[in-house]
Image (cartoon, coloured by chain):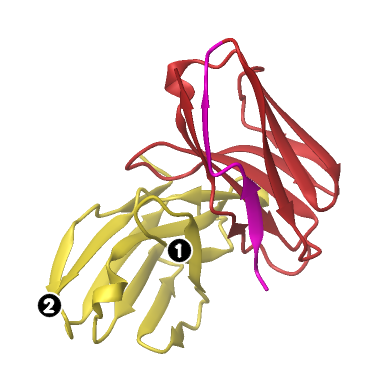
Amino acid sequence: DTEVTQTPKHLVMGMTNKKSLKCEQHMGHRAMYWYKQKAKKPPELMFVYSYEKLSINESVPSRFSPECPNSSLLNLHLHALQPEDSALYLCASSPLGQGPEQYFGPGTRLTVT
Amino acid sequence: RKEVEQDPGPFNVPEGATVAFNCTYSNSASQSFFWYRQDCRKEPKLLMSVYSSGNEDGRFTAQLNRASQYISLLIRDSKLSDSATYLCVVNGDTGFQKLVFGTGTRLLVSP
């Protein structure tokens, strides 16, 4: 079952709030990803974790802080965001060593007010 | 030049039509190629991987031309449910972990 779950589905936060996005997969995948997608644009890679270690940070502002507590979980901590950070945040996972296909969760639609 | 280029469309076709999408990529070292489908306000879903020998999955056929750095997707007997945005995806410079997405081609299938 290629299922990645994300919570919450929707999030509205003020610019001074701190919130977290959560992602979970139980497929035994050892790579997990955060993407940001604006309307009518393709997903943009933010972070990659391999074997629970951060392997790629695409020069993302420090107001976004990723965390990988274990091989099944991925969090994205948000602090002092800007309205332009409003977007769909997608989590994905892939089975390292078995092919690079990535499987996406349904996303969290974030609105920063 | 963008790393992955696609015609944004939209492609408007009637049910039952055959439609083809094309994609070009700039990194000759790319080794993995995919088509993803994305419905409005939903996540991208893997449609199929693309292999050098070409591959088919039901009504969908994908082709890869490494010499021309060109990927195609053919959809036969279009269904209303095929209406979506089709994203051409290749692996990026840092290897398999980084996928680069094209901007997508929008398909609208009408009755």
Kindly report which numbered mark, 1 or 2, lies closer to the viewer in this rendering: 2
What is chain A's hue in the picture?
red
N-terminal label among 1 and 2: 1
Other residues around mark 2 within 10 Å, as few (<14) / some (14–19) / many (≥20): few
- Which residue type carries mark 1? Tyr
Q: Position of residue A54 (x, y in %)?
A: 79, 37
Chain letter for the residue marked with disc 1 in the picture: B
Q: Position of residue B64 (x, y in %)?
A: 43, 72
Is residue A7 rendered to the left or right of residue A40? right
Is residue B36 rendered to the left or right of residue B83? right
- Which residue type carries mark 2? Pro
The answer to whether A62 is drawn above or below residue B106 in the figure is: above
Q: Which residues are magenta?
A: A1-15
A67 or A44: nearer the viewer: A67
* Residue named by callout 1: B36
* Residue named by callout 2: B111
Q: CA distance from mark 1 to mark 2?
A: 24 Å
What is chain B's hue in the picture?
yellow
Quadrant showing the N terminus of chain B: top left
Quadrant in the rendering for residue A64: top right
Farthest-out residue, top: A16
Q: SS at mark 2?
A: loop
Chain letter for the residue marked with disc 2 in the picture: B
Q: Position of residue A12 (x, y in %)?
A: 50, 27
